[in-house]
Image (cartoon, rainbow, N blue to C red):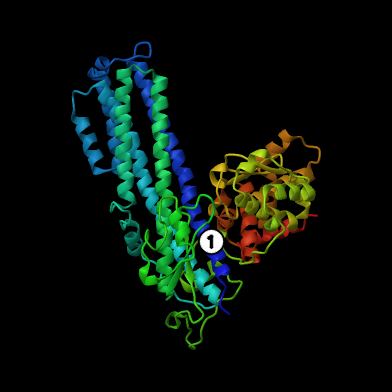
Amino acid sequence: MPKSREYWRKRFEILASAQAQIGAEYFEELSRQYAQASAAVQADIEKWYARFAVNNDITMQEARKLLTSDELEELKWNVMEYIKYGRENDVTKQWMKQLENASAKWHISRLEAIKLQIQHHAEVLYGRENEDFKKIMAHVYEEGYYHTAYEITKGYNLGYSLMKLDTDKIEKVLTKPWAADGSNFSDRIWRHKTQLVSELHNGLTQSIIRGKNPYEVTQDIAKRFNVSRKQAGRLVMTESAFIASSSTYDSLKELGVEQYEIDATLDKSTSEICRAMDKKVFPMSQFEIGVTAPPFHPWCRTDVLPYFDDEFELGSKRIARGDDDKTYYVPADMNYNDWYKQYVGVKTDSEGLRSLLGSSNMSVSEIDKLKSFDDLKRYLKDNYNAKVDEDVLSLNFESVRQMTKEFEEVMLEFDWSRSSFTGLNKFDLGYASFSPGGELCFNPQFSTVFNKITLTSGYHEAGHLLELALIKKTYPYMDIDGIKNKLISSEMAEDIVNKAFSRIRSNKSILELRKEISNQATKNYSETLAEAIRDYKLNGYSGATLTVQIIKVLKEIK
């Protein structure tokens, strides 16, 4: 029996969320890199002022003085280190040429020297961004391509044998210029670098002319890096959306799907074009990103769904058949890893999107019926004696409701944890977080509008609730500081994970089994427990091997 539109919408909404999450997690790492580069530049500026300024002031005349022979020798040592780094890493040929020219100079001013140091930090930052960005986008494409095929074949209960993606195909997608200016992501990264270097150089010159002190100069630098960081975030999320859309198209086309549908996230932040395109159906031949397919604009949250009319049949020519000419069928409980091994090739680990897909069991809970924050406040007060902080009321209700619903699903299954839940609050960390005081906390950056990227975060945070509840059961009189220390040490979560591991007969190490849950599960044992809960709620007992045993250990607790 053909699946309903709502089935496909929910499955592909989770897929889109998972793909967007890859980009968002990378942006978190990229933000740290920008902060490190900014701090390095500020430190160099402070040293420069300390060496050449008088009473924290330096004139343009002083700045343009040539370096002494000792100062020049010191700079050349730095330049040689820069050249060595450039030969071993991804920097532009143009920058390498500039460094080689600088190493041969005998007359360099103080201002030229500091500008050289500033530019090197920028070159390193953007060179690394260009290299990492390419790897991340390749991952988004590959995972999106295979997961789309998994969802379609599972929805139709039919198996396909897919050709494994080759690097040339992925490379063509990544380097394809799709923006209005005809540039690809690499072009835009290097353009952003040139812009930042120019602003830093000009800003320093102007600061010297205006007589700004070192503190004011470093504050200006921090602001410029922050602007560039936000610019990078926009590029990451928009490019992720383009790659995700491309992977969906290529996979649907390979499977013989003939039509697709636009699925927009509708709320007060939805753009006019996305509202207008929502639910429109197009033939695959008309798929054109930015025109008939998302992304339609930067930060676009619109997705693509497969569209099947009553007469559609999944292309029989590509249905997998055995030597006996019988059609293979995909079992309803087949998880992604098993599907991949059977129809694509050997999958060495379970990183990426696998942990966000699996079960289609999306039931309607009591929380789904709530229509406002007032309803939610009453519900949590009556059922859990939990409070909703006033700051939460400024967030998007749908985001709060969805995450709270996921969180409650875990509480209801592990009833012994519910007394440790104290309410909802707001905190700027991750997509969401869980406090030692028992509060589920929402990050305004991701919850001011309904953001698909936060889907399944409630399951993860509920894993931290279970850890807190176990600490309170074991140490009923422990104060909040003691609880914090226990959470930091992860010792309670470690006990659960080790107990689960002891029940597994495998040649794999505990680290390898944790990685099968997700990469995040390898950070510490608290994250292992939280990610196992997310894996279980999405995949049930078809989840990772360690997940299944962790759940069995938790279910033995009364």
Q: Name the residue: 30% across, 56% down.
A: 177
Which of 280 and 77 lies nearest the eye of the viewer?
280
Which is more toward the observer, 239 or 347? 239
Q: Can residue 294 be seen in this view?
A: yes
**Residue marked by disc 1:** 13
> Which residue lies at the image location 51% right of the left edge and 87% below the top edge?
326
Q: Residue at x 60, y 51 (%)?
A: 399
Query: Against 327, is 140 above or below?
Result: above
Q: 244 or 171: nearer the eye?
A: 244
Locate the C terminus by quadrant. bottom right
Task: Decide if residue 90 is in sight here.
Answer: no
Which image quarter: residue 405?
bottom right
Q: What residue type is labelled 1?
A: Glu
- The answer to which of 462 and 471 lies nearer the viewer is 462
Residue 536 lies, with reference to residue 192, above or below; the image says below
Query: Where is residue 468 shown, x and y percent of the image?
Result: 72, 45
Q: In which quarter of the image is the N terminus?
A: bottom right
Q: Residue at x 51, y 74 (%)?
A: 153
Q: Residue 247 at x, y = what percent?
A: 42, 63
- Residue 541 in percent (x, y) is at 65, 65
Is residue 82 toward the left or the right of residue 445 in the image?
Answer: left
- CA neighbours of label 1 inside 10 A, class few (<14), some (14 to 19), many (20+): many
